[in-house]
Image (cartoon, rainbow, N blue to C red):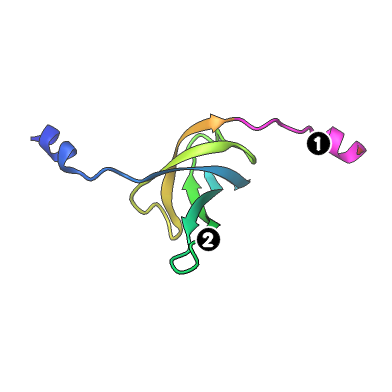
Amino acid sequence: MTNEASTDRKQRKTFEGVVVSDKMQKTRIVQVSRLVRHPFYQKVIKKSSKFSVHDETNSSHEGDVVEIMSTRPLSKTKRWRLVRVVKVAPRVDADKVGAA
């Protein structure tokens, strides 16, 4: 019975995006960009959306490329959770930033 219930559930949406903010605990802001064609002018336009994402282990940092998946509402704005870190961005030390 439980196997049948899990297979009947719809496939959850997944996106890849870049972490633009990691200032909150267990929450990241991820920007997802996509290309869409304008319905009248037929020009390809780059559109982006920002999502509040739940990161239970605080494993992602600003600049990382991550995969996110839709989930049940976790708070007022969080409806996405982190699946995995696809690409880790190079880290910059605070000492080097202050010296430049």
The answer to whether 38 appears left or right of 21 in the picture is: left
**Magenta run includes residue 80:** no
Identify the amino acid type marked 1: Ala
Q: Position of residue 57 (x, y in %)?
A: 50, 34
**What residue is at 52 percent from the left and 37 percent from the top?**
66
Q: CA distance from mark 1 to mark 2?
A: 42 Å
**What residue is at 15 percent from the left and 42 percent from the top?**
8
Q: Is residue 65 above or below residue 38?
A: above
Q: Nearer the viewer, residue 48 or 74?
A: 48
Kindly give the residue lying farthest to the left in the view shown. 1
Res 12 quadrant in image: top left
Q: Position of residue 67 (x, y in %)?
A: 47, 38
Q: Which range is magenta?
A: 88-99
Q: Nearer the viewer, residue 37 or 10?
A: 37
Q: Tag 2, which secondary structure? A: loop
Assess disc 1: are there few (<14), some (14-19) or many (≥20) residues with their C-alpha within 10 Å of its C-alpha.
few
The answer to whether 40 appears left or right of 97 in the picture is: left
**Magenta run includes residue 91:** yes
Q: Which residue is mark 1?
A: 94
Q: Is residue 81 above or below residue 51?
A: above
**What residue is at 48 percent from the left and 62 percent from the top?**
42
Assess disc 2: are there few (<14), some (14-19) or many (≥20) residues with their C-alpha within 10 Å of its C-alpha.
few
Kindly give the residue lying farthest to the bottom in the view shown. 40
Kindly give the residue lying farthest to the front in the view shown. 41
Q: Which residue is mark 2?
A: 43
Quadrant for the C terminus in the image = top right
Identify the amino acid type marked 2: Lys
The disc, 1 or 2, on the residue closer to the chain's N-terminal end is 2
Quadrant for the N terminus in the image = top left
The answer to whether 17 appears left or right of 79 in the picture is: right
Q: Are marks 1 and 2 in contact (CB under 8 Å)?
A: no
